[in-house]
Amino acid sequence: MIYQLEPIAALATAPGIGAIAVVRVSGEGAIAITNRFFRGKDLTQQESHTAHFGTLRNADGSIIDEVLVTIFHTPKSFTKEDVVEISCHGSEFIIQQILRRLTTEGARLAKPGEFTQRAFLNGQFDLVQAEAVADLIASDSDASHRAALTQLRGGFSKQLKVLRQQLIDFVALVELELDFGEEDVEFAHRDKLRQLMLDIRRVLHPLIDSFSTGNAIKNGVPTVIIGKPNAGKSTLLNALLNEEKAIVSDIPGTTRDVIEDELFLDGIRFRLIDTAGLRQATDQIEAIGIERTQQKMRDAALVVYLFDGKNVLPDELRIAVEDVRLSGKPYLLVGNKLDAIDDLKRQALQNIVGEKIVWISAAQKTHLDELKAALSARVRTDSAVQTGSAVVTNARHYEHLTGTDDALARAITGLNSGVTPDWLAMDLRVALRHLGELTGEITTDDLLESIFSKFCIGK
């Protein structure tokens, strides 16, 4: 059943002066409300998905603007309600005049995300897809765009809804056994139940594992540049960004705090973080900077260890690289000052670390393309990024996926140890609740308010 709620109106395009703006109206009577101050064809008599040119008028008959009005009849609209979209000139004054007339005629101003919330409530898509609308609008790279689009088209939620329904059927049978507790009967076939739970967990695990990558795709890959003082970290940051972002000096320890900026490579957003050089601090301020470097390294998704190829000692480099490896973070080894060392030393250092080193000259801006390619390749080794598979980018989704997996793990353990149906049903109910809250089949007003309040007004 489609519910047409009270009519709401809002600017659907970005605020500010532009050639065109679009004001959206949705809800019961949306077409009739617009028609009251539209001069042109009678909008209430027009077919759905048609556009009509005319003028919008003030109460005294004066023209507000010449507009193009597009109408959509329920249920064939974004919200599944009657919808009107008014394309007007992008003057802030005109937009406010139109919104004022709409509210005078009976509409109210929409709350953030209210159009998408109505679409969700009317079954246009599930909650994961609804959240993907906001992610799609906010996407600022090819990778984040593809991740949001995959979610909008159903992503993993459709598959989980099917599996959840199968689990509901089993839970119903397990709970039926509780009514015959003294007769020792089994309506739910235990082997089939175990297999279903294993199947669900096989779907969950790749999604859970994808969250670290998905979070980086959505928010940018935190890439911290570390190394000894005077290794050329600030020079490298400036060279990659092609601007003088960080102060460069021959004096060791110039960088006292972290400096961040963004770089887009092959559709992926990297958050580059220049840090204080790693050494024994000479004063309290430098000590704070080094502590922040270590914190950024712990939080990073990718570490770039930069060393001075001209002055570094082989044993010094070996120890430093071992420390980077022990951090457990994905990393790249980058040798700087390529223009100042010969092939023999370069090969010797390569042999010491026993893995690939990307050689550059930050000052001369040489071989930066190789470094950029290595950065991109390091992120794209993730299969989800390569194939366009569903990637979890939302912390709420991750929480419910892990909650489901934990509940199913307990249920399988209980099943294997022969727990009573009431204990088994309890864990299965927890799994169902997590799956239901994930896709929106179980919701509360507080949950919906929390999700949709983060949307922009007009979406």
Image (tube, rainbow, N blue to C red):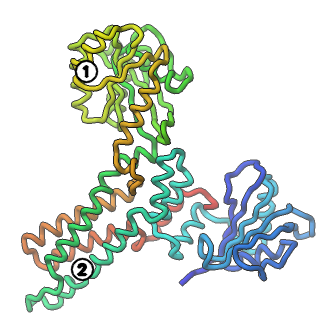
What crowding class fits label 1: few (fewer than 14 Cα within 10 Å), some (14-19), or many (20 or more)? some
Give the amino acid at mark 1: Ala
Spatial separation of the CA atoms under disc 2 and disc 1: 55 Å
Residue nearest the observer in this picture, 377 or 278: 377
Q: Quick one: SS at disc 1?
A: helix
Can residue 26 be seen by looking at this rendering? yes
Q: Amino acid at mark 2?
A: Val
Residue 225: % across, % down: 39, 26
Q: Give above or below for 396 relative to 223.
A: below
Q: Which residue is mark 1?
A: 320
Residue 92 in sight from this viewpoint:
no
Which residue ends up furthest to the front in the rendered image?
Answer: 343
Residue at (86%, 67%) from the top-left corner?
55
Mark 2 and mark 1 lie on one chain; the one further toward the N terminus is 2
User: Tag 2's secondary structure?
Assistant: helix
Q: Which residue is mark 2?
A: 171
Q: Is residue 416 left or right of residue 230?
A: left
Residue 258's spot in the image, x, y percent?
43, 26
Q: Position of residue 110 (x, y in %)?
A: 64, 65
